[in-house]
Image: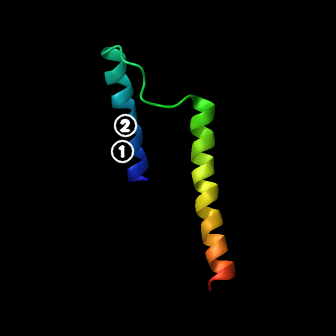
């Protein structure tokens, strides 16, 4: 839980800093960002499933 809070605080700080400096936020558009995270998660789960089913 501590990692989540540190990550959230760091993200908020970076967001404020970029807004103060009038820079674009260093993040992908919302939908494609969520799709990318979901794809990474599904790929990781799929890899472990394949290894357990076929190579164990």
Contact flag, marks 2 and 1 (Cβ < 8 Å)? yes
Element class at badge 1? helix
Mark identifier at residue 27: none
Q: Classify residue 43 by image quadrant.
A: bottom right
Q: Classify residue 23 by image quadrant.
A: top left
Query: Image check: 53 left or right of 6?
Result: right
Is residue 23 shown above or below 15?
Answer: above
**Which residue is the site of mark 2?**
9
Percent across and percent down for residue 30 are: 58, 30
Percent across and percent down for residue 12 are: 39, 31
- Can you name the residue that lies furthest to the front here? 54
Q: Nearer the viewer, residue 56 or 4?
A: 56
User: Residue at 37% across / 37% down in the picture?
Assistant: 9
**Which residue is the site of mark 1?**
6
Percent across and percent down for residue 27 are: 47, 31
- Can you name the residue that lies furthest to the right here? 53
Q: Nearer the viewer, residue 43 or 4?
A: 43
User: Residue at 61% across / 67% down in the picture?
Assistant: 47
User: Residue at 58% across / 61% down in the picture?
Assistant: 44
């Amino acid at each position: 839980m501590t990692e989540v809070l540190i990550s959230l605080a760091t993200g908020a700080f970076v967001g404020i800093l970029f807004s103060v400096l009038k820079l674009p936020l260093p993040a992908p558009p919302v939908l494609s960002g969520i799709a990318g995270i979901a794809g990474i998660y599904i790929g990781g789960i799929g890899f472990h499933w394949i290894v357990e089913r076929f190579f164990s």
